[in-house]
Structure formats: structure tokens, C-alpha cells
Amino acid sequence: MQNSKHSTEQKGASLKSFAWVSSLYFTEGLPYVAVMTISILLYKQMGLSNTEITFYTSWLYLPWVIKPLWSPFIDLIKTKRWWITAMQLLIGAAFGGVAFTLPTHFWLQGSLFFFWVMAFSSATHDIAADGFYMLGLDQQGQSIFVGIRSLFYRLATIFGQGVLVMIAGNLQVIYRNNIPFSWSLMFYGVAGLFIALWLWHSYILPRPAEDISRSGISANTIWSEFVHTIVTFFQKPQVLTAILFMLLYRMPEGLLAKVSALFLIDAEHNGGLGLSPQEYGLVQGTVGVVGLILGGISGGIAAGIHGLKRWLWPMVCAITLPDLVYVYMSYAQPDSLLLINVCVFVEQFGYGFGFTAYMLYLIYYSQGEYKTSHYALCTAFMALSLMIPGLVAGALQEAVGYRTFFIIVMICCAVTFIVTSFLKIDPEFGKKKETTESE
């Protein structure tokens, strides 16, 4: 009876942990998708040029670039649980702000302001949620739920790029192509969803004893520690090679990411494929994300068997060569939705597979005494690697057209090969450790 009672309690605790972990990381993924992807489609339909769209939306990466600057101070004020719920409420308000401003004459300034609020709130939420994950679960629980958190973050991507974009497209049909009003209604719906998530997490999130504000530690002390972390980061071996790799490995993707979305929905007379929001939601937001997930899983399995060094060059080829599908589509202008889906799936699968090498190298370079802080700095360079090319991608595309732009992206793939060639990686890194019986 006692064992049965204990087993029931364990199941109950596991279900509760699943409930808050899954919803927390779904909540983490949704505003990021809104800021980075949905905003591109919105502004394209609202009539902005590709130059303006890529320039404005690339600046929205900035909160994730400078996130390490304020992450050490989160512990000084309130608890991580407080930060999570407060940021969710603020993100919900930002969605409502975007919805309110879209039908007005100041829609661009207003929506950009609220997207900035959303971006900074989302980056702060990421810091608090990742820290809370380690406090709310023991070591075994963290291992068990690591796949769950990743899955629900990806589901948020599908929901944002796929379902929400399709909803906005369907509303445009219902309201006779009233684009501002249709997007506004969709964003009001997401604002309501975030209020519901805020209420849910206020109730369901545990209250770990360790989740307390760090009283007795001054801001000066934390700042000194942060400066020391930066100094030690730049004292690591191969630091220049590592930084160049972090900034340039994804240079082709940094150019392609935003323009590829614009290409899919741009009118045919502009050289695009002319997909409707519903079709885009299926192609990029659903099929593309599934390809990305499967590519990432395959990359992780491959690296776990033979190590990063063995799979490094196949992953470099995977993240670059499939970009050729956009060269093909820009010339062929296919009208077959199935063919477009296949092309996007191939490119996204390759990106997911090749991106594994990038993430594993960040972990590899971060090894040592300050691995958590150094990894946070690596992720800042990761965000910067997309922000910088994105700022000029739209202007470059409008100057040369989609066809020549995608050829330039392919030429830039040489940069990925060059920076990778200078890496020095332990052949054993990434391999799954085989357990042996003790003698």
C-alpha cells in the first residue's frame, strides 16, 4: 500500500512538472516567433519595402544580443518565478499594443514600439525561465524534461508561423482583405492567450525554496564578476577563430532567413512566388519547421555516435548547399505547392542538421570554469550573426533582384567553409559515453 501511494505521488508530481514545463517553453517560443517571423509577414502585407522590413526587424535581435548584460541582475530583484509571470503579462500587453495600433495612422511607429517591448520582455523571460527550470526540477527531472521543453518550444514555432499566420489569412478572406483589421484581431487573440498563460503559470509554477532574490550581493559585485567573465572568455585558446566562426558560420542563413520569407509571399511580378498567408503558414510555418526539427534530431544522433569532428564537414555542406533550392525556385517560379513544400523541407532539414555543429561548438568552446556565463556570451554572438546580415539583406535583394540575391547567398557559403577550416576540435567531443561494468 505504501509503495502504491508513493508511486501515485510520483506520477502526480511528474504530471504537474509536465504541465508547467510544457506550457512554460511554449510561452517562451511564441513571442520570439512573433518578433522574428510574423512581423516580417505583417509588414510585407502592410506595404513596407523589403529594405525597410529587414532593417527594422533585424534590430529586434538586439535584446538577445545584449541579454548577457542584464541577466546577472535578474537575481537581485524579486524571484525568477516573479520575473516569469511579470514578463508574460507584459508580453500579453505588448501583443495587445500591436493589435491596437495596426488600424491607426501611426501603425508603423506604434507596432515597432510594442515589438521592441515584446522583444526585451521575451529575452528577460528566457533568462528567468531557463534559470527556473534548473530550480524547479532536480537533476533527474531536468534530464527527463529536456526533450519536452525543446518539443514545446518548436510547437510554439509551428503555432506562430503556421496556425496564427493561417488565421490572419482566413480573417482577411472573411473581412474582404481588410489587412490591418485582420492582423489586429489575430494579435488581440494572442494577447488573450497570454493573459490565460499568465493566470495558468501564476497557479501551476512551483515555489522552489532556492528561488529567492540574492540579498547581500551588490550590483557592483555582480558587475565585477561579469567583467571578469568577459575577460576570461577572451583569454580562451583560439578566441579569434571561435568568434569569427560564431559570427560567420551562419552568414548565408543570416542573409537568407528574412528574404526567403519575403520571396515566398512576394507577388510574382516582383519575382516572388505569391503565396497567400494560409499557404505560407503551411509551407514555411509547418512543413519547414518539421524539416528543421527532423534535421536537428538527425544531427544530434549523428554527432552522438561519432562526435562533432567526424560530422563537422557533412554538417557544413548540409547548412549551405540546400540553399540552392531558392536559386532554383527564383528561376523556375513553380506554381506547384507540393514542389515548393519539398524545396523548403529540404532546405530546412539541411539547416537543422548543419546547425547542430554550430550549437555543439558553442558548448565545446564554453567548457571550463565559467561555462554557463561563457555559453551566454556565445549565444549573444549567435544572435549578432543573424542581426548584422539581416540589416542589409533587404537592401541588397532590392538592388539586384531575388535571382541574383540567392546566387550571392550561395557565393557567401564559401565563408562558412573558410571559417570552419580553422577550427580545432577534440575528436572525442560530442560522442555518447559508453558505460562499462565496474570491475
Image: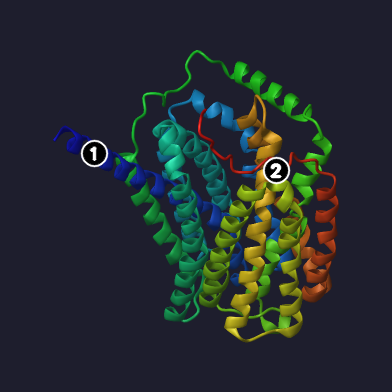
Q: Nearer the viewer, residue 188 or 366?
A: 366
In front here: 164 or 106?
A: 164
- Assign the N terminus to one quadrant of the image: top left
Image spot of residue 312 (x, y percent): 74, 52
Report the front residue among 379 and 420.
Answer: 420
Residue 106: x and y in percent read 57, 60
**Which residue is labeled 2 in the image?**
361
Mark nearer the viewer, 2 or 1: 1
Q: CA distance from mark 2 to mark 1?
A: 40 Å
Left or right of residue 333: residue 407: right
Counting labels gives 2
Residue 218 left/right relative to 356: left
Residue sticking out furthest to the bottom: 335
Residue 198: image x %, image y %? 37, 45
Hey, what amino acid is under mark 1? Ser
Residue at the spot 47% in from the left edge and 57% down from the top edge:
156
**Could you tell me which secondary element the residue under label 2 belongs to?**
helix
For numbered disc 1, what is the local secondary structure?
helix
Q: Is residue 114 left or right of residue 68?
A: left
**Residue at the extreme top of the image, as rendered:** 216
Residue 7: image tag: 1
**Residue 383 visible in the picture:** no
